[in-house]
Amino acid sequence: MKCAEGEGDAVDGVVRGDLSVSDCQDCIADSTKRLPEDCSTQKEAIGYHYSNCMVRYANRPIFGIKELSPNCTSLRYKFKIPASDVEKFRYKLSILFDGLKNVVSARDSRNKFAIGFENVTASLSVYGLMQCNPDLSNSDCSDCLQVGIRQLEPYFSNVTGAGIYGPSCSLQFENYRFMYMSSNSQLPILSPSASPSNHSQRKGWNSHKKWIVIVVVLLIPLAALGLWLSGKRKKRIHKQVRNNVQITCVDSLQFDYITIQDATDSFSNAKRLGKGSPTKVYKGKLPNNEQEIAVKQLTINGRHSELEFNNEVWLLADLQHRNLVKLLGFCIEKDSRFLIYEYLPNESLDWFLCDSVKRAHLNWETRYKIILGIARGLLYLHEDSQVTVIHRDLKPSNILLDLAMNPKISNFSKASVVHADQTRGDSTTVLGTYGYMPPEYVKLGHFSVKSDVFSFGVLLLEIISGKLISEFSDGGRGESLPSFAWRKWVEGKAVEAVDQSLPQLQREMTQILKCIKIALLCVQENPTSRPNMSTVVFMLNSNIVSSIAEPSRPAFIIFSDMYQPSSSSSSQKDKSNEASVNEASISYLDPR
């Protein structure tokens, strides 16, 4: 279904051929509502409502043009195909897809859609679906589907379901009957020589009636989207960016609940990691390749927690760095949300810092590697990724460690994305952990990359002192760890802020004192005085301590006044100004 408004503005909508009229209407209506909200500043956007429909708008001609990107690849692992059936499954799927492609590409513009199945064994079948945009020529349709088949071929033998959804065509296969059809409907068995049947012609007037109804119900929401696009172009209203991320298709990251349930032995207590933590995390193993995973279970109890879950998924889907935790996928099951990460056997940094026995294994070389890795991860977020990301909750429990003690920054639920030409944002809600938040954020709600720099400075002092800021005790002076380190620095006794379990080697002590100096630069009260992360990384790699600027007085945060028993804060600030950057700048994810 097409719609045009104004010069160059175009709106296109395509629904799956097996959907009912009401499902078509619901799918298009929901997509046309979400797309302007999630892409309000974009001149061109495309939205896939799962695999059911596609809505697209652009300020250029798009009708009748074959386009292969952006597309969305979705993989599903319901169970492991028996080794004896893998080649047969692959062969039958190739036959099915070849037949479907021949049928779809030969049909006229009213019905470029086909479904079918092939029996693999007595207990295993493969079902397929293909569809082209009705405005594509037969040759373009065939070419588009062939490209999609080639992209899915590597997965023919190791997944039980997959799909590619693009602007011009889509294709999907599953090991179960996933089409929207009545239980007594018969599916065709297709072969490479399959040709368009006369079945659609035999439907006669009934088929035409269905298409007339669909045209009517789809025109209304698509016309509304076209009017919005036209009005947006004409009025040129300036709006804050809700999401400046070039987002990949996260549907490809979605796991079935059965998969992660099997991987964790039904979330067995024996698989539970960090049993002392309120967050439920389970160790698991994927059935297809036996990859070890960590499954984090969340309970959604309101809009705020839903936003944090979405934030984590959308950001980590696009962020890739050796010092960021790798998100493998997610799962939505009723009121529970699951995040699936790479498994990191050494858990988090706080488990080492709060345990004297474990802390003894942290020699200075290991600590320095952790410090440098965290700094590089933050530098990537602030300057080297496609967008500027402010983490806003950097602390030891959010630093995970792999087998070689390489650090991985985790938990992006509170992170914010800002414009490329912005350096800060304002928030009506303070999110984070007391002690790691800078004063300008706690008092005024102002956050920036320098907020993360402050948190890094506190974290650096924790690693050097071997003490968590929440457990720091200075004999009743009411000082925080940063103010304690500052006092020892100006007294010329900075060595007293160093973990006494570390050997007092002269070569290492020079490097430790350099790190204390860098930490004090990071926790200065004035955000403009704090270095950016590129400067921090440069200083960490430099052997010349004298070239590093002298720090000024840090922000004095007194724990007796500010620290709360719960580790995290989500307090509301009494401020009239609107947030210039959303707390969670993404759209909702839904179960399949």
Image (cartoon, helix red, strand yellow):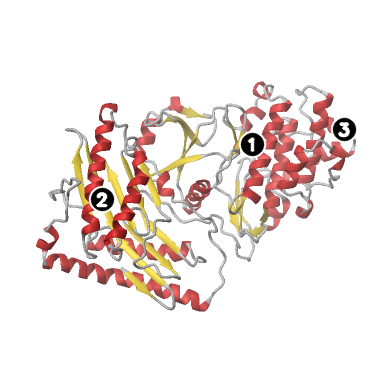
Q: CA distance from mark 2 to mark 1?
A: 48 Å
Query: Relative to residue 425, is residue 195 drawn left or right?
Result: left
Residue 176 seen in the current view:
no
The one of 407 and 8 positioned closer to us in this rendering: 8
Mark closer to the chain start, 2 or 3: 2
Q: Circle 3 sits on which residue? A: 493
Q: Taking 500 as reference, is 45 above or below it?
A: below
Q: Residues within 10 Å of mark 2 (few under 14, many from 20)?
A: many
| Picture quadrant of residue 18 | bottom left
Question: What amino acid is found at the position of numbered circle 1 in the picture?
Answer: Pro
Query: Relative to residue 141, is residue 368 drawn left or right?
Result: right
Q: Taking 250 as reference, is 400 above or below it?
A: above
Q: CA distance from mark 1 to mark 3?
A: 26 Å
Query: What residue lies at 73% left-to-right and 42% top-to-bottom?
Result: 537
Q: Which mark is residue 129?
A: 2
Q: Taking 96 as reference, is 402 above or below it?
A: above
